[in-house]
Image (spheres, rainbow, N blue to C red):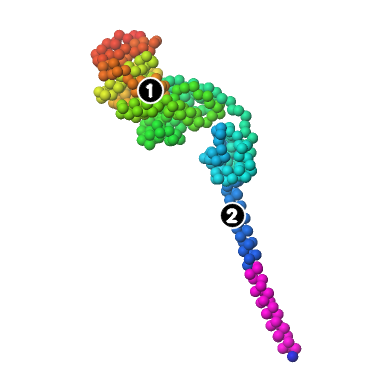
């Protein structure tokens, strides 16, 4: 009998365990699911936190200059930081700033930030602001080349060297937002020395002493577009000239003449272009050789460079200097009395820079013979 009771007791206990498991199983399933979900959320949250909030690169302390203009809002500042490679998400930056109530505390200015800074650190820096930056006035005179401008800025202590400035001017690729530049970059001429030659408008600029090369160039390009008005564009179209054609011609005039003769020299060049003659200007030879000579050797005159207007018909490959407004105007509006009548000119005096004009080659040769002793 005791054996039967033991067997019944065992079955009763088994049924009790089964009943308990049936009750606990769904509860445990729910608890386990919650734990898994929490773990997943934590894992995803941690990953997002690492990706969006923590530094882009903890090991990169290279200072990156970020210039925040006056009146810039949180979204614009986030965009600047994102484009500088300092944050990985603009929206997260805005959310953080808004959540912390710091939107109104962000200050305009120039900041050196780095990729080893997290969003919180960057916001703290921008909220503190920085002392006013030292400025300097730089005067770019008519006829200066890209290399002249680079050397001037180095001499004024803006940069240690002009390497980056010259490279930006050479390719022009960082300034595609300017239509006059994008037109050149999209139709490249392989031997062109500097894409931006001719477009760094001569003027006096107030710049920061620690200004970036790109910001300085942008100032000059903006000024160029201020000067090259819609009226100028319409006039260029009337002459079947591109902006680059006009600036190239203006750069020749700038190097060949004084103000009083700008429009006369323009008339000579326009006339020779219409007649299919070479321009025969020595100014590009000075650009090619880097020598500021009045006379060049036969070997130099026969240089095959596409800038050489003694060898190649039409305009040179591109501008040879940065012309001012007066020569741009002259390129668009040549002297009507000289146009189609005078085809030659030569230097009358190296002291004054005055020119003498001729209608024929014979007359031109006589002028050279007469005035050469005064060169």
Question: Where does the image place residue 62, in percent across and percent down from the top left?
Answer: 57, 37
Q: Which residue is mark 1?
A: 328
Mark 1: secondary structure: helix
Mark 2 or 1, which is nearer the eye?
1
* Above-or-below relation of 294 to 47: above
Question: Where does the image place residue 108, in percent across and percent down from the top left?
Answer: 58, 33
Say which quarter of the image contains residue 331. Answer: top left
Side of 228 where 280 appears, left or right:
left
Instruction: Tell me how many marks there are.
Output: 2
Mark 2: secondary structure: helix
**Badge 1, how many Cα within 10 Å: few under 14, some, many 20+?**
many
Q: Which residues are magenta?
A: 2-28
Residue at left offset 43%, top offset 33%: 178
Tell me the quarter of the image containing the C terminus: top left
Side of 175 where 4 appears, left or right:
right
Say which quarter of the image contains residue 321. Answer: top left
Side of 102 where 159 appears, left or right:
left
Residue at left offset 26%, top offset 15%: 359
Tell me if residue 3 is in the magenta stretch.
yes
Residue 327 seen in this snapshot:
yes
Tell me the quarter of the image containing the N terminus: bottom right
Provide the major secondary structure of the magenta segment.
Answer: helix
Side of 119 where 284 appears, left or right:
left
Question: Where does the image place residue 264, in percent across and percent down from the top left?
Answer: 32, 16
Q: 192 or 258: which is nearer to us?
A: 258
Residue 287 seen in this snapshot:
no
Q: 313 or 44: which is nearer to us?
A: 44
Residue at left offset 24%, top offset 15%: 360
The tag on residue 44 is 2
Tell me if residue 31 is in the magenta stretch.
no
């Amino acid at each position: 009998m005791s054996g039967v009771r033991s067997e019944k007791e065992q079955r009763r206990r088994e049924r009790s365990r089964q009943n308990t498991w049936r009750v606990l199983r769904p509860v445990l399933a729910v608890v386990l699911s919650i734990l898994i979900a929490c773990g997943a959320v934590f894992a995803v949250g941690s990953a997002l936190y690492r990706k969006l909030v923590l530094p882009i690169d903890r090991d990169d302390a290279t200072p990156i200059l970020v210039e925040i203009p006056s009146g810039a809002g949180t979204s614009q500042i986030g965009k600047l930081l994102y484009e500088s490679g300092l944050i990985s998400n603009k929206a997260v930056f805005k959310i953080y700033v808004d959540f912390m109530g710091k939107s109104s505390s962000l200050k305009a200015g120039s900041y050196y930030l780095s990729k080893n800074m997290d969003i919180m650190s960057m916001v703290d820096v921008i909220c503190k602001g920085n002392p006013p930056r030292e400025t300097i006035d730089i005067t770019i005179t008519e006829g200066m080349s890209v290399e002249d401008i680079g050397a001037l800025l180095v001499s004024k202590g803006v940069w240690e060297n002009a390497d980056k400035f010259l490279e930006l001017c050479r390719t022009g690729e960082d300034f595609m937002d300017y239509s006059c530049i994008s037109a050149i970059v999209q139709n490249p001429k392989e031997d062109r020395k500097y894409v931006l030659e001719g477009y760094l408008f001569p003027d006096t600029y107030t710049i920061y002493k620690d200004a970036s090369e790109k910001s300085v160039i942008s100032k000059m390009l903006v000024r160029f577009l201020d000067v090259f008005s819609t009226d100028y564009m319409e006039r260029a179209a009337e002459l079947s000239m591109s902006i680059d054609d006009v600036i190239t011609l203006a750069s020749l005039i700038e190097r060949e003449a004084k103000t009083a003769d700008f429009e006369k020299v323009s008339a000579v060049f326009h006339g020779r272009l219409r007649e299919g003659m070479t321009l025969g200007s020595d100014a590009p030879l000075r650009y090619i050789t880097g020598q500021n000579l009045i006379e060049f050797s036969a070997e130099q005159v026969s240089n095959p460079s596409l800038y050489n207007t003694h060898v190649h018909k039409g305009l040179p490959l591109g501008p040879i200097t940065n012309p001012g407004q007066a020569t741009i105007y002259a390129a668009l509006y040549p002297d009507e009395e000289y146009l189609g009548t005078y085809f030659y000119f030569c230097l009358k005096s190296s002291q004054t820079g005055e020119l003498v004009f001729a209608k024929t080659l014979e007359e031109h040769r006589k002028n050279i013979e007469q005035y050469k002793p005064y060169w």
